[in-house]
């Protein structure tokens, strides 16, 4: 099998405005180094896959509009730093260096294992998961005489999910629920059924990166509408902007996270939800409301489902066990009208024939009686959020956090647009990050970083110290080159 080669246009699009990064202070940074840093960031973000060959130097120089020698030098730097490896007789391919990229970087001992702050997801509540699977194994016996394929999900889980919605003030029956293998699966199925290539889909900006990827993969175009933390928590969503964007672009759908939004943790107020429902109905736009984070309220609960503000079929809600309980369960769902559920089940058959029965039964066990477990998870998150804020105040006092009333992460505004460079360099200091631009379109959010508080207070402190060390070096190197002082 030949080696896959990355297209020059794809690389150029993913790089965005690489030459401006990380900001004015890099004016004196050689252009080849800026390019190499941009490619490193894409490797760490998973946008440039491992094992792929980069475009030919000639092709990339044409597409980026820089000299061939710039590309040659950037590739040489990537090779020196271990991001490009050559096997005899074949082209160089992308790798992640085994060790830090520069001898000036600290060497990490085994005790300083890398803190992974690139994921916003907690470890499993071990005892509860074990108990749920033990009970599920007993229930499984009832399913063994059947063929076991349940495209819309087993009835007992759909009943539990419907009951939860009803208890939250949104009357729901089991035939309005389809169980999926996670909320991401639910979103992908919905986009496949509701949109065609070229359709516009409104999104919160910033938003959950894998949602952006799903929108891209179906050939739809994400239309960003800003979430503005400075407007205050409940009003951070620009509803006028959503309304005009819906009408101007004839958007087919909108994908929004009004409940403890990823990455900001913000929650839309009740008035905003009522208006949002009206906007969707007036614009004949299907609203996909992602409630994955809804159980993770830390200061006050969500004011209620957006779908409760409308009896129209145009509001579809997706949910998941991933954040409330454990990402490894891979159980999520869609709440929609039965005709849409039927269309989704039809579309699903081309991809899979159902979520494993055992996992569905374990999810039903967990959700049937989850009040105490969720209280414990929220208490743990409050402690961790405080620890993260304290560590940031001590080590990075100039970074401004958005603190929402729930969720799993802080969205931080840095004094300088260095998010990609910081993310590229951070693993050498013992921490893995997700760069701000991953949460937006067209290279936005270079001044932002998401830091989750899903890990222990001790790991968070270590992580922040590592981020501060990486940031300090970055600032020093840049100021030495450009004569700036941070
Ligand atoms: C807002 C949001 N939606 C969906 C998902 C994916 O959920 P799942 O693991 O159930 O596919 C995540 C996970 O990070 C998320 O943050």
Image: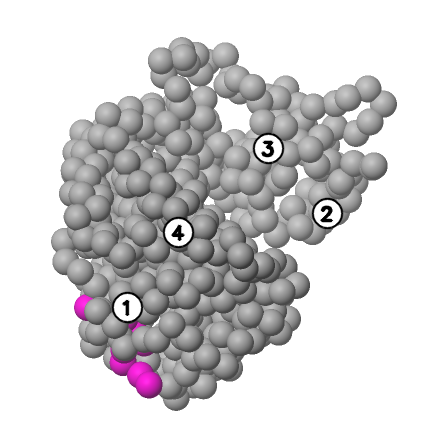
State which mark lies toward you, 4 or 1.
4
Q: Residues within 10 Å of mark 2 (few under 14, many from 20)?
A: some
- Of badges 1 and 3, the one in the foreground is 1
Marks 1 and 3: CB-CB under 8 Å? no
State the colouring used for the structure image. Answer: one colour
User: Who's the residue at 69% across and 23% down the image?
Assistant: 85
Read off the residue under disc 3: 36
Q: Is mark 1 within 8 Å of ligand 1?
A: no
The residue where tag 1 is placed is 163
Q: Nearer the viewer, mark 4 or mark 3?
A: 4
In the displayed structure, would residue 226 be above or below residue 455?
below
**x and y percent of residue 329 in the render?**
42, 46
In contact (CB < 8 Å): disc 4 and disc 2: no
For marks 1 and 3, the one nearer the N-term is 3
Q: Indicate the secondary structure of the residue bearing disc 1.
A: helix
The alpha-carbon separation of the residues under discs 1 and 2 comes to: 49 Å
> What's drawn in magenta, residue-wise?
303-311
Q: Is residue 126 magenta?
A: no
| Pointer 4 residue | 139
Would residue 486 be found to the left or right of residue 343 on screen?
A: left
Given residues 165 and 468, the one toward you in this image is: 165
Q: Mark 4–mark 3 contact, CB under 8 Å?
A: no
Work out how far the residue at label 4 is from the one at label 3, CA to CA, in angstroms: 55 Å
CA separation in Å, label 1 and label 3: 53 Å
Q: Which mark is residue 194?
A: none
Give percent across and percent down for residue 296: 24, 52
């Amino acid at each position: 099998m030949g080696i896959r080669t990355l297209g020059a246009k794809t690389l150029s699009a993913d790089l965005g405005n690489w030459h401006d990064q990380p900001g004015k202070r890099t004016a004196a940074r050689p252009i080849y180094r800026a390019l190499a840093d941009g490619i490193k960031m894409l490797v760490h973000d998973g946008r440039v896959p491992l094992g792929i060959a980069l475009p030919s130097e000639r092709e990339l120089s044409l597409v980026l509009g820089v000299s061939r020698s710039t590309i040659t030098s950037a590739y040489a730097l990537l090779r020196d730093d271990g991001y490009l490896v050559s096997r005899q007789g074949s082209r160089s391919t992308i790798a992640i260096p085994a060790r830090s990229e520069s001898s000036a970087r600290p060497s990490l001992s085994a005790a300083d294992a890398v803190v992974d702050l690139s994921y916003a997801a907690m470890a499993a509540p071990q005892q509860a998961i074990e108990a749920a699977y033990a009970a599920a194994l007993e229930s499984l016996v009832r399913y063994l005489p059947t063929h076991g394929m349940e495209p819309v999900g087993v009835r007992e889980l759909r009943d539990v999910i419907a009951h939860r919605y009803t208890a939250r003030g949104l009357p729901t029956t089991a035939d309005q629920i389809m169980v999926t293998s996670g909320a991401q699966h639910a979103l992908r199925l919905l986009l496949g059924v509701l949109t065609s290539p070229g359709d516009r889909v409104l999104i919160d900006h910033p938003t959950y990166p894998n949602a952006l990827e799903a929108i891209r993969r179906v050939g739809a175009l994400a239309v960003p509408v800003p979430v503005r933390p400075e407007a205050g928590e409940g009003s951070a969503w620009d509803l006028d902007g959503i309304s005009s964007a819906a009408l101007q672009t004839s958007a087919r759908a909108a994908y929004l996270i009004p409940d403890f939004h990823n990455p900001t943790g913000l929650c839309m107020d009740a008035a905003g939800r009522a208006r949002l429902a009206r906007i969707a109905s007036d614009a004949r736009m299907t609203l996909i409301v992602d409630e994955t984070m809804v159980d993770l309220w830390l200061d006050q609960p969500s004011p209620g489902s957006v779908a409760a503000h409308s009896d129209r079929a145009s509001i579809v809600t997706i949910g998941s066990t991933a954040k409330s309980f454990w990402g490894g369960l891979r159980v999520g769902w869609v709440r929609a009208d039965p005709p849409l559920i039927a269309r989704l089940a039809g579309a699903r058959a081309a991809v899979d024939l159902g979520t494993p029965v055992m996992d569905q039964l374990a999810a039903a066990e967990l959700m049937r009686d989850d009040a105490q477990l969720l209280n414990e998870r929220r208490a743990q998150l409050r402690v961790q959020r405080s620890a993260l804020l304290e560590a940031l105040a001590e080590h990075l006092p100039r970074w401004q956090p958005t603190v929402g009333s729930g969720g799993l992460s802080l969205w931080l505004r840095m004094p300088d647009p260095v998010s990609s460079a910081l993310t590229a360099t951070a693993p050498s200091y013992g921490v893995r990050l997700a760069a701000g631009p991953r949460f937006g379109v067209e290279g936005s959010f270079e001044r932002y970083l998401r830091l989750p508080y899903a890990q222990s207070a001790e790991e968070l402190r270590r992580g922040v110290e590592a981020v501060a060390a990486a940031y300090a070096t970055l600032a020093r190197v840049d100021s030495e080159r450009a004569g700036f002082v941070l």
